[in-house]
Every structure is written in C-alpha cells, then in structure tokens.
Image: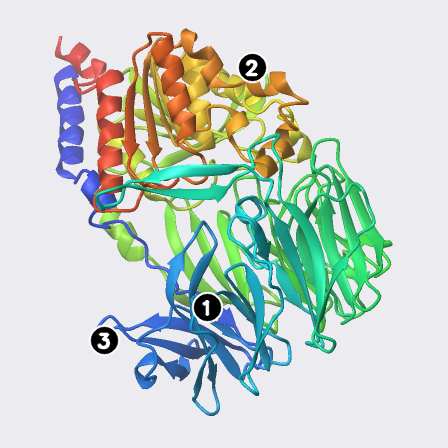
C-alpha cells in the first residue's frame, strides 16, 4: 500500500510537470496573458448611443464610430481621418455640448502623469470641415457650452479661439516657465490633486474662471537626462518638498463681454489650496473648494461671477485630513450631492443650495467607492460600494431620499459600471481572482443582463495549460487586528514541506492590494515564483482603505510606523504555519511599497531575510508638500514622525540582502531617495545591491526590454537569497524509506 501511494503522488507530480511554466518573456515580451478589453467609449447625450475611437492598423487611420446601446452595433462613422487632408490620425476627441462639433487631438507629447501638449482641430460634423485651433502645441482645449469658442493654454497663458470669426483673444499675458502658470496646474497639483485643466466655462459661455499659480518662490528640482546625445541635459522644474514653499494660487474670472480679468478675494486667511473650481447650474455662481495647508479644514464656497463676492456653503473638518473627490454634483435646483466619511465611512449626502443638509442618502459600516451619477427622471442615484465585503465591488441604485436601495450586480467580485447618459443602460465590467474580465450590457432599472459583449474565456482555457495556483483569500489575525490577505501556493503544494515566503505589499494610505479581481502582470510573476517553490502572500494592514475612517487614518502623523508593525507581525504569524520556513521570508514593494520593504529589512531585520525596494521613498522629507503634509503635517511640526520612520535612520539594523532599484528620470519619487539611502548604507559599511535605470520615470518601463530586465534582476535576487525548494516533498522521501 505504501508503494502504491508513493506511485500515485509521483504520477500527480508528473502530470503537473507536463503543464507549461510561465516565463518572464510570456509576461513582459510576448503579452501571452494580455486580456481583451473594451475600447474606451463615451456616452452621447442624444439618444442611447455611445462612441468609440478605433484605430486601423492596416492604414494607420482612426475613426470615431457611433454605436447603439440597444443593439451594440455600429450605427455610423462620425469622422474618419483618411477623409481628412490635414491629419493622418487623431488620438483624442471631445464633443461640444450640442454634439455638433468635435475637438480632435493629434501629435500629442506627454509632460507628466496626466498632462500633455498636442495639435488640436475643431471638426464640424455637419459640414465635415476642420478648423485649426492653434498652429502651436497647446494644452486642454475646451469648448464653451454654446460650442462657439474654445479656451486653451499655451506657454502658461490662456487663449480663447472664436470659431465663428476665427479670431483669438489672449486672456493672460504674464505666463512664464517655472514662474507663472495660468489655467494649468503646477506639478504638485497635477500629481496629488489629479487634475490639469484649471479653468472652467460658465453656462452662458460669457465667463471663464481660472487658477493662477505663482511658483516663483517654489524651490527647483533638477534631474540629469542622459539621452543619446554627446552631452546630457537637465530637466528643471518646481517641486515643493515637505515643509517648503508652495505656489501662491489665486482665483480669477475673465469676463468675455468686458474683456476684463479680475481676481477673486476668497476672504479667508485659512485658504491655502484650491483643488477644485466648478460652475454650478446657476450660470453666475462658481463653486470653489479650498483647503488649509494641513488639509483638515475644507470649505465649499460660492462666488458671484459678477460682484466676485464669496460666501461659505459647506465646511468639513477632520482630526486627520479631508480627502478631495470629484463627486460634487449639482442638481437642477442647485442642491448638490456630496460624499464624505464624516460618520466614519464614506457615504453620499444631499445638501440644499444654501448648504443645509437635506439627508444622508447611504448609511452603514461600509464604504461607497464610486459615485456614478443621478437620474433626475427616476430620482435615483447609482454607486459602487463594498457592501459585499471590503475586497469586492458591487453596483447599487438608491432613491434620492435614501429609500428603495437595489443591488444591480449579481456576482460577487469586482463590478464596475459605465452608464449611458440617459441612465437607461450600463456596461458592466466583472472579474474576480479566478475569472478574467467579462463585459455585459445591463438594464439600469433592474440590473438585468441584456447581452454579453465580450469575455476572456480563451484566456481561461489558455491558462489551464499552465501551472497556475488559485489565489486564496483569508483574514490574518495579529495582536493589532485582522487583515485582508491573499496567498498563492505552489501548484504541487505539500503541507509537509517547508516553503520560503515572499511577501508583496503597497500599504499606502487608503490603498488596497488585497482585492477580488483579475490578475495584473505582477500576479503572473507571482505564479512564476510559485512554480519555483515560493509561497507568495499579500497583507493589507492598518492605513489601507475601504474599511472605514479609523482603520485608514490611524497612521496619521506616523507614516510607516503601524504599517511596518503589521507587516512584521503578519510575517511572524505566517512563519508559525507548518509549511512556511520562518527563516526564509522576503518582501518587496514599489514606491510606498518600496518604502515599506526598506523599513522591513531594517526595523524588521530579525524577521525578513531579504527585501527589494523599487522607487522607494526613503525619507518623507524628500517628498512633495501636498501628499506628505496631508498625512504628516510639516517636518518643522512633526520632526520625529519623519525621522523615526525613515529607513535611512535605521540602516545599522540591516542584516539581510537588500536590493535598491530606481529610475534616474523619476520626477515623482526622486532618485535622490535611493542615493541618500545608498550613502547611509555605505557610511555604515553595510553591503547591498542596486540598479539604476537611466532616464526612466517612476514606472520604469520606457525603452526596449526595460521591464524584462528589471524582473529578471528581481527574480535572480530572490533566487539568490531565499532558499530554493526544488527537492521532492518530504513526505515522498519519507515514503521511500
């Protein structure tokens, strides 16, 4: 019987071995596991239609095509670049409010994460004529509501193009690189408040509100760009590090009738940041969101577009910080929808135009994760939430009065919705850890699936030929709480064998890495590592999101402290499992995750044998004002919070193997972080490994084979420093005897 049992196990292993193994070339070169996705689409206001930008690989042309929500079939081609003499193709489009005109963008060049410049044309759908907005490469061209004008920026100044007479008005004249910016955000606003266009038309198309950034006093940061020329160049830009001067931001309104520009006095000493401006449904009332520097006191103001007088409509305070969102929605009566976590969880609220609370629409010990919009005809709101568990996403609708809530998505996992403008239909995207994305057309009223648009069953079938292990979800309990966790075991897992443990985390405030959704590229890398005999685990500790305000904001003024405690505790708890080798535990992360893995190999040196840090923050003193001070206040106010949780100040504790990786052209987390960490290690005479990728930005992806090289580097480092387990399982060895 013993012999037969052994033969059965051996036969199972042989069958497993017949399956393909994932390679880094599969992931980063061949795109073997790339999912099929829907092209980006935009819902039209006229009827239940949507548009998709399609690219013809055969002739290099692009088309903007119109489709029906009801049939999902193409109705017509609105514009085809091959019919246009002026441009070969276009990469972006924007409709006018009446959907009679289009702005087509071409020859785009990226600046930072969200910003770019390009050449733009107006296309008249009826006449089929093109009109060049400017011969220069411009930013953020935007139609006026009447469709007759386009506002844009060029060289830090604002211009308005009159489409009727083809004339151009220059609105501002003082724009200057690294000094004055009009209508476009500076680097830190773009990165941390996540917007670029800092101007907005009123409903009558006769006023343009905009922000002016005076960054004269902001310290400059410079990066060497090596390129391919004989001499390197320098990229110099304004970057306010924690505690340093920010740009002075002011609000202005340009009156097209009088051609006059006026600054708005917001009338409050606490005003520091202006992260949002938006005209209300009252064409003469501009809403302005302001924040103090600590970002724990938010004001929503209404500004009279004629008198420039302002008054407070809504105030929100928090002992830690208040997050900025784009959920602010004005209804026909100028009452507004607002999201807030003031009751301990992020929920939807309804306020009158005067700022009086009408009612809290959603309630419960769960978070609203996406607000989709309001259907005035049915008085219903549509949103996404974690009511089905914090690792899942589900779509709901609810009455404006907070009654008659309906669950629209039926499957547990990750659901997201793209609604038609009429709110009659939505396209649902669904996936979970075992199901690649499925796209369906659904009825908004009931959530009923009307038609499947696209699935990725072919990928499921392809993966059945590979040694793939399921991602297991569970709650990991430590002395400081219970944390969402996933684990990937080797396909031939044997509970009687000891496996090295490799942990991944990000851990940043409000983030989530443990989610029930389909794989990203890193997930296939983890599968490849599992093939090699590693167990991979991810734990979302304190400070991560979607579990309520207190769970997220406990890290306030102490970034890194509680997060690393939880990763160390998690590693220790996992090390108690019979099948994990507690002496062979590694960890890695990128950006904030790299900061954490650096803390792990220093503060947690007795727990972690190796760590990889990619593009890490190594001291919050080096990072920008908006992000850092939101969670830490300034270094002048909270020096201990900055220094006690900086891995630079704990290098003498490092015992294991440590790999530092950074992009030399990272405008976000500067390579300075890695260089200062390296210098501290050198001064302490502590060995380490390092790789700098020339001119690469924060994502380290540009250029041939960059990602392949990086992941080869990391894989080899793991293999070199975590014990390999390629022997047959101990049980088989025992049975042999």
- The quadrant in which the N terminus is found is top left
Residue 59 bears which disc, if any? 3
Of the residues under marks 1 and 2, which one precedes in the sequence? 1
Which residue carries the number 1 mark? 41
Cα gap from disc 1 to disc 2, whole angstroms: 48 Å
* 734 relative position to 420: left or right: left
Of the residues under marks 1 and 3, which one precedes in the sequence? 1
User: Marks 3 and 2: in contact by CB < 8 Å?
Assistant: no
Which residue carries the number 2 mark? 644
Residue 464 visible in the displayed image: no
Residue positioned 40% across, 43% down in the render: 235
Residue positioned 39% across, 46% down in the render: 518
- The quadrant in which the C terminus is found is top left
Cα gap from disc 1 to disc 3, whole angstroms: 22 Å
So how many labels did they put on this image? 3
Q: Position of residue 148 (x, y in %)?
A: 59, 82
């Amino acid at each position: 019987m013993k012999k037969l049992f052994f033969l059965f196990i051996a036969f199972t292993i042989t069958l497993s071995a017949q399956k393909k193994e994932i390679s880094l070339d599969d992931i980063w070169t061949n795109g073997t596991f790339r999912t099929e996705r829907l092209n980006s689409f935009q819902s039209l206001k006229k009827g239940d239609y949507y548009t998709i930008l399609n690219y013809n690989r055969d002739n290099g042309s692009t088309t903007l095509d119109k489709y029906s929500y009801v049939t999902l079939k193409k109705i017509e081609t609105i514009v085809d670049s091959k019919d246009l003499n002026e441009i070969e193709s276009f990469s972006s489009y924007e409709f006018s409010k009446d959907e009679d005109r289009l702005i087509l963008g071409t020859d785009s060049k990226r600046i930072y994460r969200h910003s770019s410049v390009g050449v733009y044309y107006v296309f008249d759908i009826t006449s089929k004529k093109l009109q060049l907005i400017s011969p220069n490469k411009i930013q953020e061209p935007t139609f006026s509501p009447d469709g007759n004008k386009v506002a844009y920026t060029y060289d830090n100044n604002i211009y308005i193009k009159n489409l009727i007479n083809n004339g151009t008005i220059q609105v501002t004249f003082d724009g200057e690189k690294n000094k004055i910016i009009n209508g476009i955000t500076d680097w830190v606003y773009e990165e941390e408040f996540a917007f670029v266009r800092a101007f907005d038309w009123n409903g009558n198309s006769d006023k343009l509100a905009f922000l002016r950034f005076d960054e004269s006093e902001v310290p400059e940061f410079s990066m060497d760009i090596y390129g391919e020329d004989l001499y390197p160049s320098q990229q110099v830009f304004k970057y306010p590090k924690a505690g340093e001067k920010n740009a002075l931001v002011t609000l202005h309104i340009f009156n097209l009738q009088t051609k006059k520009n006026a600054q708005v006095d917001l009338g409050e000493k606490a005003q520091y940041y202006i992260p949002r401006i938006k005209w209300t449904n009252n064409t003469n009332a501009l809403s302005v969101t302001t924040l103090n520097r600590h970002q724990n006191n938010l004001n929503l103001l209404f500004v009279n577009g004629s008198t420039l007088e302002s008054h407070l409509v809504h105030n929100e305070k928090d002992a830690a910080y208040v997050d900025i969102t784009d959920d602010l929605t004005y209804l026909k009566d100028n009452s507004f929808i607002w999201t807030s976590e003031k009751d301990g969880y992020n929920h939807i609220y309804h306020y009158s135009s005067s700022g009086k609370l009408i009612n809290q629409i959603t309630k419960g010990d769960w978070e609203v994760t996406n607000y989709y919009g309001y259907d005035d005809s049915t008085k219903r709101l549509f949103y996404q939430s974690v009511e089905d568990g914090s690792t899942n996403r589900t779509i709901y609708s609810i009455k404006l009065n907070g009654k008659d809530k309906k669950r629209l998505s039926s499957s547990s996992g990750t659901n997201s919705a793209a609604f038609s403008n009429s709110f009659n239909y939505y396209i649902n995207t669904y996936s979970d850890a075992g199901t690649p994305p499925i796209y369906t057309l659904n009825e908004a009223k009931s959530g009923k699936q009307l038609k499947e648009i696209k699935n990725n069953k072919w990928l499921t079938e392809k993966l059945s030929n590979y040694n793939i292990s399921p991602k297991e979800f569970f709650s990991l309990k430590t002395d400081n709480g219970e944390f969402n966790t996933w684990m990937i075991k080797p396909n031939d897992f044997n509970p009687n064998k000891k496996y090295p443990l490799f942990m991944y985390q990000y851990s940043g405030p409000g983030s989530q890495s443990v989610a029930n959704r389909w794989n990203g590229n890193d997930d296939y890398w983890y599968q490849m590592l599992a093939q090699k005999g590693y167990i991979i685990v991810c734990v979302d500790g304190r400070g991560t999101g979607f579990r309520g305000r207190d769970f997220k904001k406990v890290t306030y003024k102490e970034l890194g402290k509680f997060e690393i405690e939880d990763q160390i505790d998690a590693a220790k708890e996992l090390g108690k499992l019979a099948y994990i080798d507690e002496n062979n535990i590694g960890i890695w992360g990128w950006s904030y995750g790299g900061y954490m893995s650096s803390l792990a190999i220093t503060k947690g040196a007795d727990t972690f044998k190796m760590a990889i840090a990619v593009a890490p923050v190594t001291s919050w003193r080096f990072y920008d004002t908006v992000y850092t001070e939101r969670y830490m206040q300034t270094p002048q106010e909270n020096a201990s919070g900055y220094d006690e949780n900086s891995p630079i100040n704990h290098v003498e504790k490092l015992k294991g193997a440590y790999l530092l990786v950074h992009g030399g052209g990272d405008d976000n987390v500067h390579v300075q972080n890695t260089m200062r960490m390296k210098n501290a290690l050198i001064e302490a005479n502590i060995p380490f490994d390092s790789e700098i990728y020339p001119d690469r930005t924060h994502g380290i992806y540009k250029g041939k084979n960059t990602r392949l090289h990086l992941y080869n580097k990391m894989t080899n480092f793991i293999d070199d420093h975590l014990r390999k387990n390629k022997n047959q399982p101990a049980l088989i060895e025992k049975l042999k005897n």
